Image (cartoon, rainbow, N blue to C red):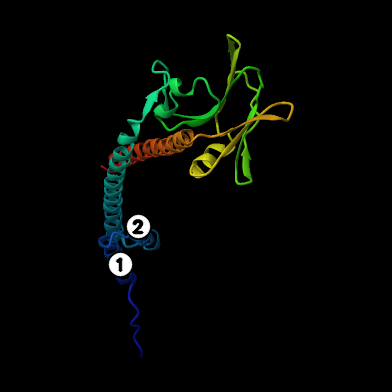
Amino acid sequence: MMLSCAPSREERARATFEQALTQYKSQNFNAAKILLDSIIYTYPDQKQLVRESRDMMHIVYRTEQERNLLFLDSLLEIRESEIAPLMKDFQEEDPNANMPILISKKQSVGRSFERSLVKAHTDKNGGFFISSHYTGETPINHIAIKAEVDGQYLVSDTITDDVLNHAFENDGQIWEAIRYKNASDNGVAEFIASNFDKKIRITLLTPKGNGYHFMMTETDKEAVRETYYLAALLRETIQIKGQIRNVKTAMKRLK
């Protein structure tokens, strides 16, 4: 008569538990959780080991969240240290607004009021947008912007919303401005930021299909690039802070 040498259910469950412990000690938390789950749902008759697995699962989740929090706190500190020196080159466009808009000092009112340009803006949450500005003796009523580099170009959406369009006349001088919010620049800002070291030709497009052309200055190209980069960092810090709140909430539930 031959006797079976196959391991019992308890032995198989215990072996899986030991594997889970090994994965946990190696900080392979997902692998540890999968193994512990397999014990809980595959061996419900092994009540003592199921209890141990549930307890161990709690420890794994807790350790994982603690590691996540440590990483996120460190990442937030790095991003804030990157933002701090950049902010010195920016000023608030309207300090009294509920969410003040930041602009590069290179494009302050004193440096941009009497010329045509592309201007970059961001709020402190990283809400980025650009605006096109025209100054001249006759109105052109432009409704879109085109940026061109070495034969390649991008064109914004057509903007006819009066809230985003602004024009006025003073002593025979015309000023027009359009804000391209909610990604209505159609990638023009990123295009400028990516090609800041090249010659960029801007065309302010009109309803008649013609346009007003000018070349971006080195200062304006740098301002758009720097604002675009700052906005990305600000958005990332907001996301990190949200993740930190979520981790802390999860940790409270695990207590």
> Would you say residue 172 is visible in this rendering?
yes
Quarter residue 233 falls in: top left
- Badge 2 amino acid: Lys
Label placed on residue 85: none
Q: Is residue 172 above or below residue 90?
A: above
Quarter residue 69 falls in: top left
> Would you say residue 123 is visible in this rendering?
no
- Who is closer to the viewer here, 231 or 9? 231
Residue at image coords 35%, 79% = 6
Q: Which residue is mark 1?
A: 19
Q: Is residue 17 above or below residue 149?
A: below
- Who is closer to the viewer here, 139 or 51? 139
Q: Earlier in the sequence, mark 1 or mark 2?
A: 1
Q: Is residue 252 left or right of residue 145?
A: left
Q: Residue furthest top?
A: 171
Q: Is residue 10 above or below residue 129?
A: below
Q: Quadrant of the N terminus?
A: bottom left
Q: Residue furthest bottom?
A: 1
Residue at disc 2, secondary structure: helix
Measured from the top left, where is residue 23 in percent x and y?
30, 63
CB under 8 Å between discs 1 and 2 = no
Q: Is residue 236 above or below residue 26?
A: above
Measured from the top left, where is residue 115 in percent x and y?
53, 23
Label placed on residue 33: 2
Q: Residue furthest right?
A: 208
Quarter residue 239 falls in: top left
- Badge 1 amino acid: Gln
Residue at disc 1, secondary structure: helix
Q: Residues within 10 Å of mark 1 (few under 14, many from 20)?
A: some
Residue at image coords 58%, 34% = 185
Measured from the top left, where is residue 14 in percent x and y?
29, 67
